Amino acid sequence: MKYKIEKNTVQETLMIPLYGRKMCSGLYPELYRDETAAKVMDSVDYDFSALEKSSGKLMQRFGFLEAAMRQSDLAYEVRDYLKSHPHAAVVNLGCGLDNTGRNCENGTCKLYNLDFPNVIGVRNELLPAGEREENIACDLNDTAWFDRIDASGDVIFLAAGVFYYFLKEQVRALVCAMADAFPGGVLVFDAANKKAVKLMLKTWLKDAEIKDVGAYFAVSDAKSELSAWDSRLQVSSRGYMLGYNDLKTPSVSGFFRFLSSVGDNMMKMQIVKIGFGGNQ
């Protein structure tokens, strides 16, 4: 029996990125693969027709490419970290139905997936925790969840599309608390400048009747802006469209490579990596 997804619920919000990851895999298979997305879609009772109707539009397809590169870049950073920290904890912050942890599995690492209780409830039905894996229901800003993470073999945190919805001070407080609790750990996440974040959040901000996007987390020069938060932070960043892959592949048009360059350079779409002191 398929799991019913009701309209206008938090469960429905999980379907859009899930559908996007499936489309990424089909359109750009040499750049990104997520076999779990298709399997989960087959196990839910939900009408995807509205998403399918718009999926052929040019900018929608570019959006799928953006999603593919973001997930691929974050997975690259996780796998790279696990090469030197094979027993590390891999912690997916604001995980939704994303399966990056399992996709980076090395047979010895520990996997944690964190999100709000109503999201984890859905995840437990559709993606129940496997071996060395735990789904944790929590509010990321309530750092009580720190005690659930076994970082004895070190730890890498990833957050995909999460911090855009946080206030700047919330991100700063969380990062500094993580530096206290997990010395030697690493956090990787996607970010963009204020102009890009304003475009991303335009609909959400309008619905929430919030006019000033300035309070929400955005970053242009990650190294200078975020290093100032705490002397222990070791900050670097790379463009997330072209910083890890030149996209010179048959599935990506020259126009999309041009848009990718605009995204990285003008919108400062980037993968930020923060080391919490110690040996990363």
Image (cartoon, rainbow, N blue to C red):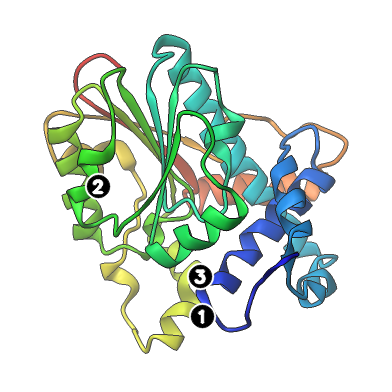
Residue sitting nearer the eye, 156 or 236: 156
Which residue type carries mark 3?
Leu
Secondary structure beneath disc 2?
A: helix
Query: Which of the two marks, 3 or 1, is nearer to us in this view?
Result: 1
Q: Residues within 10 Å of mark 2 (few under 14, many from 20)?
A: some
Look at the picture and state if 142 lies above or below 147: below
Q: Is residue 188 left or right of residue 181?
A: right
Look at the picture and state if 28 lies above or below 172: above
Residue sitting nearer the eye, 13 or 250: 13
Secondary structure beneath disc 3?
A: helix
Q: Which residue is mark 3?
A: 199
Dividing the image into 4 quarters, which one contains the C terminus? top left
Q: Can you name the residue that lies furthest to the front here? A: 1
Q: Is residue 35 left or right of residue 167?
A: right
Which residue type carries mark 2?
Trp
Query: Which of the two marks, 1 or 2, is nearer to us in this view?
Result: 2
Dividing the image into 4 quarters, which one contains the N terminus? bottom right
Which residue type carries mark 1?
Thr
Residue sitting nearer the eye, 39 or 161: 39
Query: Which of the two marks, 3 or 2, is nearer to us in this view?
Result: 2
- Say which label, 3 or 2, has the lower sequence index: 2
Regarding residue 105, the answer to whether it shows in the image is yes
Secondary structure beneath disc 1?
A: helix
Image coordinates of residue 262 in percent, x first then y, are 60, 50
Q: Residues within 10 Å of mark 1 (few under 14, many from 20)?
A: few
Q: Which residue is mark 1?
A: 203
Q: CA distance from mark 3 to mark 2?
A: 32 Å
Image coordinates of residue 109 in percent, x first then y, are 45, 21
Image coordinates of residue 134 in percent, x first then y, are 42, 40
Q: Which residue is mark 2?
A: 145
- Say which label, 1 or 2, has the lower sequence index: 2
